[in-house]
Image (cartoon, coloured by chain):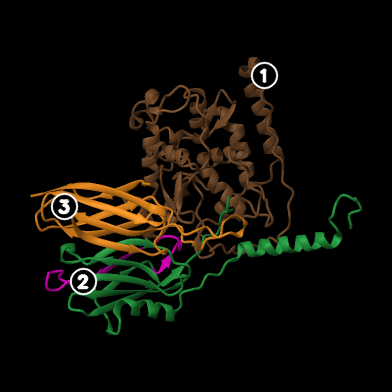
Chain colours: A brown, B orange, C green
Amino acid sequence: MNLVRRLFFSTSPRISSSIRVERPPLPASGEREHLWPLLSLIAFIAFAATAPAFATEIPSSERRSDYELMGPQTRAIQDDDTANPGMLGALDGEAEWSRRDGAANKSCADCHGDARASMKGVAARYPAFSPALGRPIDLEARINMCRTDQQKATPLRFESKELVGLTAYLALQSRGMPIEVGKDERLKPFIAAGRALFNQRQGQINLSCAQCHDDNWGEKLAGAPIPQGHPNGYPVYRLEWQSLGSLQRRLRNCMFGMRAEPYAYGAPENVDLELYLMSRAQGLKMESPAVRP
Amino acid sequence: MSARTLINVPAKAKRGEVIEIKTLIAHPMETGYRVGLNGALIPRDIITTFVCTYNGEEIFRADFARAIAANPYLTFSTVATERGTIAFQWTGDNGFSASAEAPITVE
Amino acid sequence: MSDHRPESRATRRDFIAGSASLAGGLALASAIVVRPSRATPESMAAAIKEVVGEAPVRKGKVKIDVPPLVENGNAVPLTISVESPMTAADHVKSIHLFNQKNPQPNVIDVHLGPRAGRAQFSTRIKLAAAQTIVAVAALSDGSFWSGDADVIVTIAACVEDLQ
């Protein structure tokens, strides 16, 4: 059943030109240490000057996990590990953790040992800054970096059983822990880029993420309450998908629903958005693998 | 072919006690009514039968129709009679078959 | 504007027809493209008849525990319970769940016996639209009992592009 409902907002539908957000060029490797703070400062001032007025961000005292807006029956599915289909994915990930792969014939466990110890708190800190890339990296890309660099194996595809399972298993090790993302100074320009994307009107209905999730959370849309849109439960078993999926899948789904062109899996815009959303959810407890409608 | 399963059976129970058994299995439960790319129907692919045995004797059976949600969740109860094995078997379209077991001690 | 390039077969008429069907196709893709036969109250009654035959079905004993407003029709959690001592002499043999508006009337058939201890099971089902669901229990004395529940189903605000 894929009826697309009209959104009852006052904007009249019109195609808006996408606003290209400029990012500073990466400095040459030798100059990285010196130029980076200056370039990021310039970039940040540029963003602040050119960006449109932002919707009011939710103050930290009012931050609520999307869990709280779900009905009791859906919450019950998440609360029971034997009823939560996301746990099937986490079990897949547990198996994947110990599977030897690649030219190096190594498993994650060979280097990282027991994930319950070594991966505790990791998912609550991602996306993190990657010195190798000079920009933020999310959990999926970080796993793939290990796969290519350490295991000498091919990267796992987004939404593949292996990658979703692994991220679910890793994120499970942070369950109950507060999100700690965004304090790193090097991430500031990317958080700003993500914030700009979140506030940017886009697509055929000229809607921004902020209009629903900052300005109208708690109100009803097509009979269902609008959540604040925090990513503290990913990968999530979305009832609409009938499967476990990544945050990037959800963002692409959102953009498609907004009648905007979604960014490709792994695109920097997606990672900037993930980073912004995690920093916007600072302090909320991780719930992965969560259940959402 | 098999599938990931999650079973919850109490490890220990008193004789005569009614225990709850919870089962969860990974399966797309494709109804056959969904439309995929190019407008073609995605063919039906569901689990059709679930059987639970207690030391080999059938204690519960379910026939699933297409309306059972993906990754079927099913809970039911049984009387703890004796120690042994509670076994689960799922069968379905395209030769699908999966099984799981849980031991139980009864005092 | 007609295309003057000799190698292209596109003409103005073809272009408009193409874009109209694309727009129409887009509209259709967001509505239901294929309409399989739907269960109706009649087909549900027929499905119930297959289970009970000519025997009467009395209302009572059967309780359906389901949220009245469901967040997503893809996974509606419910619990069905039947009042019964579940002894060898007096127990529930089977419980059958039906629906009115999905393409097919059957949902699940559960076979129990005195070993169940309780005539109760929980599962998650798919409901295509707001509708009434009916559960029929067959007792060991040959009688049939039923219970029903009305469920309203909301649809996800943002649906996904099929990849």
Q: What amino acid is found at the position of numbered circle 3 in the picture?
A: Asn
Q: In this rendering, is residue A153 above or below B89? A: above
The spot of residue C151 in percent (x, y) is 41, 71
Viewer-closest of B93 and B71: B93
- Judging by the rendered image, the residue that carries numbered circle 3 is B55
Q: Chain of mark 1?
A: A
Q: Is C79 covered by the magenta stretch?
A: yes
Residue at 34 percent of width and 51 percent of height: B97
Q: Disc 1 to disc 2, how far (Cα)? A: 76 Å
Q: Which residues are magenta?
A: C68-91
Q: What amino acid is found at the position of numbered circle 2 in the picture?
A: Val
A218 relative to A288 in the view: left or right:
right
Q: Comparing marks 1 and 3, which lies closer to the viewer?
A: 3
- Judging by the rendered image, the residue that carries numbered circle 2 is C92
Q: Is residue A76 visible?
A: no
The spot of residue A46 in percent (x, y) is 70, 34
